[in-house]
């Protein structure tokens, strides 16, 4: 790859708007082939190491004593307005250890244990009937019409409804939560922008945090059986969490619970529509829990809803043939690792029966996605209902992607299908 092409690739990988108009996979495929541990200099004032091989990504994820989440936050700065991470409100909170994903070692373990009980398998299984009822509600709004914006009407609705159920957030605020989430995670997307990316993210995050804190403080006085009450009542070393820690973690749970499942479902359905043989094969197996389990894992591998995670090296170390220096940023590109031909046979084929499937779509190691069990159950139920009740599915127009380097997500996905009767409840 010549220097000019490499510079353009680096620029695109640090440009949120590029992710909205193009697929970064072509760039990541070239890097993985030619320079798998690649020093990337794009729009930022500093460079970082792009990790594109599965083995190297897993190595970074499982060694949190070498690669810190706390020193830089877990994601690349959302825009060039945040080039100095200490000056950004969001990253300043992360650097202060205010969020579980931006913590290391014992503090991270303590916080994770405090929040994890609701996401363990026994607790998640108890939610199956609730998830199914909410999913049916989403589908029933569109089935008789024979058309919908699947990303907004169905795939985006269930995760928002479910995380709101788990946190006991009132229905009237759901549209605001939807918009605030996008403002926070995709501030360069013109559909959600209210000014500069920094202004958009600050306002969206601030409104979400203010709202969550208000409810959380009320629940310290009158707690309920919900995740927000759990966060409000959590103690570390005998002390309640500081207000901003409560608000920031509540906000993070809402964003994670809403966006990743939505993006996985949209991406998987797009792949199935474009691979009708796989769609019909899966439709024939829809009553087989094992088959749906494989399909869900492939959906997460294929879409890699969280594009990357950022770490900071706390010591000198080598990855591949590259010398990583203490203080260097290291970025694991999940979507690149999940297309690594050395690990995944026919990596660029959507295979509903793929096994084994050791994808990094939920990360790996100490920071493995806390909500993975919940996301898997949501995806399985949604796919099952879709296969049963949506026939003759076709894309009306190309899916429209969000301008975000953080979430590889479809924000609009117009579908046409055979109108169907309401699903009985």
Image (cartoon, grey):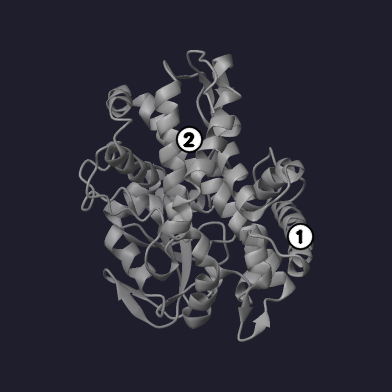
Which x, y percent locates residue 110? Answer: 52, 78
Circle 1 Cα neighbour tier, 10 Å, few/some/many (<14 / 14–19 / ≥20): some
Q: Quadrant of residue 223?
A: bottom right
Q: In the rendered structure, are the residues bearing label 2 and label 1 in contact, judged by CB atoms less than 8 Å apart?
A: no
- Identified at 39% across, 54% down, the residue is 334
Q: Which residue is mark 1?
A: 215
Q: Is residue 222 left or right of residue 53?
A: right
Circle 2 Cα neighbour tier, 10 Å, few/some/many (<14 / 14–19 / ≥20): many
Q: Which residue is mark 2?
A: 266
- Identified at 40% across, 40% down, the residue is 380
State the separation of the CA atoms marked 2 and 1: 31 Å
Q: Nearer the viewer, residue 322 or 245?
A: 245
- Identified at 68% across, 61% down, the residue is 224
- Identified at 54% across, 43% down, the residue is 130
Q: Is residue 256 left or right of residue 345?
A: right
Residue 420 lies, with reference to residue 230, above or below; the image says: above
- Whether residue 73 is visible to the viewer of this picture, yes or no, is no
Which x, y percent locates residue 196? Answer: 74, 51
Q: Locate the C terminus and report the quarter of the image it occupies.
A: top right
Residue 110 lies, with reference to residue 278, above or below; the image says: below
Q: Nearer the viewer, residue 203 or 37?
A: 203
Kindly report which numbered mark, 2 or 1, lies closer to the viewer in this rendering.
1
């Amino acid at each position: 790859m010549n220097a000019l092409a490499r510079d353009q690739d680096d620029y695109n990988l640090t440009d949120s708007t590029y992710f909205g108009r193009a697929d970064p996979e072509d760039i990541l495929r070239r890097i993985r082939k030619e320079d798998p541990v690649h020093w990337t200099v794009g729009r930022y004032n500093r460079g970082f190491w792009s990790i594109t091989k599965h083995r190297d990504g897993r190595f970074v994820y499982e060694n949190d004593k070498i690669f810190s989440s706390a020193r830089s936050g877990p994601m690349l700065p959302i825009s060039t307005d945040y080039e100095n991470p200490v000056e950004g409100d969001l990253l300043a909170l992360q650097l202060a250890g205010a969020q579980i994903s931006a913590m290391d070692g014992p503090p991270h373990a303590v916080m994770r244990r405090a929040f994890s009980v609701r996401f363990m398998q026994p607790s998640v299984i108890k939610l199956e009937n609730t998830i199914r009822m909410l999913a049916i509600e989403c589908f029933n709004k569109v089935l008789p019409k024979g058309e919908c914006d699947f990303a907004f009407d169905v795939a985006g609705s269930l995760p928002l409804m479910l995380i709101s159920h788990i946190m006991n957030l009132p229905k009237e605020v759901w549209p605001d939560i939807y918009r605030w989430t996008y403002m926070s995670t995709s501030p360069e997307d013109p559909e959600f922008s209210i000014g500069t990316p920094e202004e958009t993210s600050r306002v969206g995050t601030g409104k979400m945090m203010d709202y969550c804190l208000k409810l959380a403080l009320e629940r310290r006085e009158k707690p309920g059986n919900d995740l927000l009450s759990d966060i409000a009542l959590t103690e570390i070393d005998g002390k309640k969490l500081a207000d901003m820690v409560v608000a920031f973690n509540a906000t993070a749970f809402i964003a994670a619970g809403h966006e990743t499942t939505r993006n996985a479902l949209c991406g998987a359905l797009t792949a199935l529509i474009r691979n009708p043989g796989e769609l019909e094969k899966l439709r024939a197996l829809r009553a087989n829990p094992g088959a749906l389990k494989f399909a869900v894992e492939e959906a997460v591998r294929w879409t890699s809803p969280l594009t990357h995670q950022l770490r900071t090296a706390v010591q000198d170390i080598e990855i591949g043939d590259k010398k990583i220096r203490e203080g260097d940023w290291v970025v694991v590109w999940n979507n690149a690792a999940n297309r690594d031909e050395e690990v995944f046979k026919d990596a660029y084929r959507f295979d509903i029966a793929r096994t084994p499937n050791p994808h990094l779509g939920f990360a790996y190691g100490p920071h493995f996605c806390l909500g993975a069990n919940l996301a898997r159950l949501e995806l399985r139920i949604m796919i099952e209902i879709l296969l049963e009740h949506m026939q003759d599915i076709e894309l009306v127009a190309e899916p429209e992607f969000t301008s975000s380097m953080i979430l590889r997500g479809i924000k609009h996905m117009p579908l046409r299908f055979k109108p169907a009767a309401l699903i009985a409840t």
